[in-house]
Image (spheres, grey):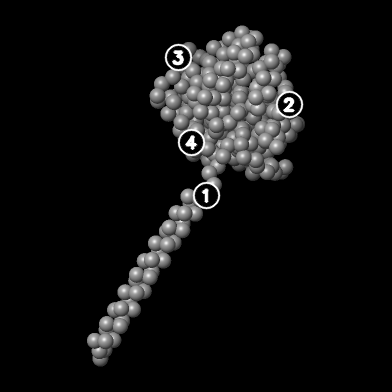
Amino acid sequence: MKTLSHVFLACLTGFILFTGCKGNSGNSDKTAADSLAAAPKAVPGTLIKYDSAKRYIFLTWDDAPQPPGTNICKRIFRQQGVKATFFVVGFNANTPAKKRIVDSLRVSYPQFLIANHSYSHAYNKYKQFYAHPDSAVNDFLRNEKELEVPVKIIRLPGNTSWVGKGEMKGPKSTMPVCKILDSLGYNVIGWDIEWQFVNKPHVGSVPVQGVDALIKQINDSFDNDLTNEGNSVVILAHDRMFEKPQYIDSLTKFLTVLKQDPRNVFETIDHYPLVQRSKK
């Protein structure tokens, strides 16, 4: 039979082991939490190492926020697990709800990046906009400030031009603006392939190319080195193109097919080669 002293000793030992385990568990939890808090937050523009065996795809969607299109595209990109860049327009963020869409994109880096597509979108009067370079540049600066754009990356409205630390390419009409932006340390990003659309009454913006034709265009561009940068393609589309169910399905199919090729890597535009070179 166990004596009372034996019982007491067993209970005391169990208590010590129990409290010791609790203490260790608490320390483990604290250590895990500390490690999580100490993990570096992703910063837009960080340099990445390119793999020459991969094909880099930059999905760039213009004119955000344009609900419901912007929110639909966000949802599809999340479901597909791909990165994308939204070029935002201040004039379109004219309500608190639309500003919240921009905010939601901003805090979703590294999956989503917001970049600058001007405040006014030149009011769609491009010739007049580029004829007054100082005014045009101020339009971009206003947009950056009001929408808190985290990167000095711009897409010119209505024109495909490229600027990166002295490298400049594009129509003559945009060069005065490009030179000022370059002197201020900005990159300007054009596009290699546009998923075009037409506006139809009572329907809205309708994509022109089918998915198969667009995929072929991308593959041909890679295979024949027709892109602005080797092993990289910048695709332009607009948020409002994907409001109807049939076009949402097209976007889903497009991404699904691209993901089937193991060479394809999706990146945000701050990791585009021209931008990365500007950081060095």
Residue that numbered label 3 is attached to: 202
Quick one: label 1 or label 3, which is nearer the N terminus?
Answer: 1
Between marks 2 and 4 in the image, the one whose residue lies nearer the viewer: 2
Q: Which residue does the image show at 50% across and 30% down from the upper left?
A: 73
Q: Position of residue 96 (x, y in %)?
A: 40, 24
Which label is found at residue 136? Answer: none
Q: Secondary structure at mark 1?
A: loop
Mark 3 vs mark 4, CA separation in Å: 34 Å
Mark 2 vs mark 3, CA separation in Å: 45 Å
Residue 151 visible in this rendered orientation of the protein: yes
Between marks 4 and 1 in the image, the one whose residue lies nearer the viewer: 1
Mark 2 vs mark 1, CA separation in Å: 35 Å
Residue that numbered label 1 is attached to: 39
Q: Position of residue 241 (x, y in %)?
A: 52, 23
Q: Amino acid at mark 2?
A: Gly
The quadrant of the rendering that contains the N terminus is: bottom left
Q: Pointer 3: residues within 10 angstroms few (<14), some, or many (20+)?
A: few
Residue that numbered label 2 is attached to: 166
Q: Secondary structure at mark 3?
A: loop
Q: Which residue does the image show at 72% across and 42% down from the upper left?
A: 52
Residue that numbered label 4 is attached to: 107
Q: Residue furthest left?
A: 4
Between marks 1 and 3 in the image, the one whose residue lies nearer the viewer: 1
